[in-house]
Image (tube, rainbow, N blue to C red):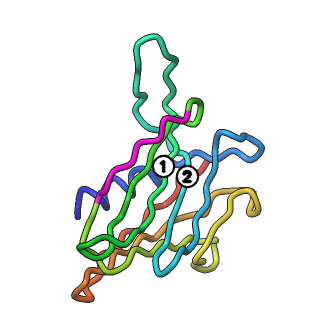
């Protein structure tokens, strides 16, 4: 669990959203009983022979029902080329919730294109099946 919360927070802190840049985005909401979040972040470039490399990565976290309860899925891709990669990062949880700090209050959804910016911070909460919660708040880097 610690690895997941650390990685999630690190990626949020390195989020990169530029209005009017179609390669960057920051949005999230609720689908079914759990949240999803999708954003671009600065990451280590994945170099492939003969292909250009970028340190910009698109990331999406979402929750899906699995045989063991709810699973958190991480999808990532190079916004220049696509190439989505999908991996299960946690299984057997109860819920996955994401909230966005507007500067005044916490919101359950965010659309960077409408807000014209990233949120100031993101709070991620994982609720285990026994009701325990694990939360992490990460401030989005500012320009």
**Residue that numbered label 1 is attached to:** 59
Report the magenta residues as a range.
82-89
- Could you tell whether 111 is left or right of 100 in the image? right
Task: Name the residue rendered at 52%, 65% in the picture.
Answer: 121
> Element under label 2?
strand
CA gap, disc 1 to disc 2? 6 Å
Q: Is residue 43 magenta?
A: no
**Image location of residue 134, percent across then percent down:** 29, 76
The quadrant of the picture occupied by the N terminus is bottom left
Q: Which mark is residue 2?
A: none
**Image location of residue 25, percent across then percent down:** 63, 50
Circles 1 and 2, Cβ within 8 Å, touching? The answer is yes
- 9 or 142, nearer to the observer: 9
**Residue 1 against residue 68 in the figure, above or below:** above
- Could you tell whether 128 is left or right of 49 in the image? left
**Image location of residue 67, percent across then percent down:** 26, 72
Task: Name the residue rendered at 39%, 48% in the picture.
Answer: 86
**Residue 130 against residue 104 in the figure, above or below:** below
Q: Which mark is residue 39?
A: 2
Instruction: Give the residue at the far bottom of this rendering.
Output: 131
> Element under label 1?
strand
Task: Name the residue rendered at 47%, 41% in the picture.
Answer: 84
């Amino acid at each position: 669990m610690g690895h997941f919360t650390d990685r999630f927070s690190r990626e949020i802190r390195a989020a990169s959203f530029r209005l009017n840049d179609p390669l960057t985005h920051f949005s999230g909401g609720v689908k079914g009983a759990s949240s999803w979040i999708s954003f671009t972040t600065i990451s280590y470039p994945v170099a492939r022979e003969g292909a250009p490399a970028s340190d910009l990565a698109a990331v999406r976290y979402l929750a899906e029902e699995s045989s063991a309860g709810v699973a958190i899925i991480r999808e990532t891709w190079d916004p220049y080329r696509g190439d989505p990669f999908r991996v299960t990062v946690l299984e057997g949880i109860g819920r996955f919730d994401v909230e966005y700090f507007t500067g005044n209050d916490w919101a359950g959804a965010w659309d960077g294109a409408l807000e014209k910016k990233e949120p100031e911070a993101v709070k991620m909460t994982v609720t285990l099946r026994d009701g325990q919660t694990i939360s992490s708040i990460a401030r989005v880097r500012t320009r």
